[in-house]
Amino acid sequence: MSGQEHRAPIALLLILIVSVSGVSSRTLTITNHCGHTVWPGILSSSGSPTLETTGFALEPGQSRSLPAPHGWSGRLWGRTHCSVDSAGRFSCVTGNCGSGQLDCAGHGAKPPATLAEFTFDGHGGLDFYDVSLVDGYNLPMLVEPRHTHGAAAGPNCVVTGCVMDLNGACPSELRVGSSDGRAVACRSACEAFGSAEHCCHGEHGNPNTCWPTVYSQFFKKSCPRAYSYAYDDATSTFTCGGGGTSYAITFCPSTTSVKSVGTDAASVGGGLVGSSSWPVAPRHGSSLVLLGVAIAALAPIF
């Protein structure tokens, strides 16, 4: 047997080992285009592999890319108005995960918070993703699929999310204010009122009896592609060909950046209120302009 014949089965074995170990070239690139610091938080689903961090800080204009392992499932959100108290305990006014530290360490976001949810390599080998306002809203956010290695995108692999600043437009009964009176988040009707009708619980706990309310319609009309209530799957779940698609998640994207990736701004809220209503970090180059972003998807994974 020649040297090449020896090397061939070894190469195949290495490929097999890489596949079994779940190594993936997929990345999540998280960018802050807000005019203030955002502290992303990350929670992996039960039984899912984990990412290299569960929480960190992003200054205006900063980005961070995280490798995402094969089969990862979880959610990502932005925390705002964070500080450390005299006892060294870290906390945030919105999106707080309650860990008392920069890492969320297995804790989820306290509502209200805008959520990006992902399940990679799911049914049929597809990636499922969505942007959800079911737990309320605190930041504009988009998710943009980026295809690599000749990945088959599919017709439902699109940019989506919520560009609009909903804090200023939030109904008074849902509005969350900071200590200085500024609107910093918008609660869901479930959190505000706790009724079975608004929470899709009890007799309303199925798609035949849980319907949009005037409050969920406020979210849906503002951001048509984002989840607005628990059974809002038909217009809010998106899929891409698995394995070769990475995702860019952007806080406070502009309508200009959304249009740059070929998406109608109105479908993600930009047609109603432009990004001028939200403080946006200055651009530092064309690479930041590309972060248009996107989506929304998969039925709640938690």
Image (cartoon, rainbow, N blue to C red):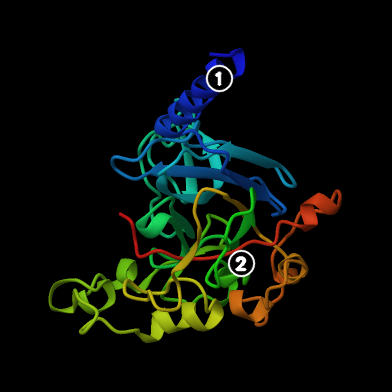
* Placement of 241 over or under 106, stated as above or below: below
| Disc on res. 159 | 2
Q: Is residue 58 visible?
A: no
Spatial distance from mark 2 to mark 1, Cα to Cα? Answer: 46 Å
> Residue 300: x and y, percent?
34, 61
Q: Quadrant of the C terminus?
A: bottom left
Q: Quadrant of residue 268?
A: bottom right
Residue 284 in sight here: yes
| Kind of residue at badge 2 | Val
Query: To which residue does mark 1 refer?
Result: 5
Residue at 57%, 69% in the rendered image: 162
Towards the viewer: 222 or 301: 301
Left or right: where 217 falls relative to 279: left
At x 44%, y 41%, the residue is: 70
Outermost residue, right side: 285
- Residue 210 circle label: none
Residue 290 percent across, percent down from the top left: 76, 57
Q: Residues within 10 Å of mark 2 (few under 14, many from 20)?
A: many
* 185 in relation to 53, above or below: below
**Percent x, y of residue 181:** 56, 62
Q: Residues within 10 Å of mark 1 (few under 14, many from 20)?
A: few
SS of the residue at dot 1?
helix
Viewer-proximal residue, 186 or 297?
297
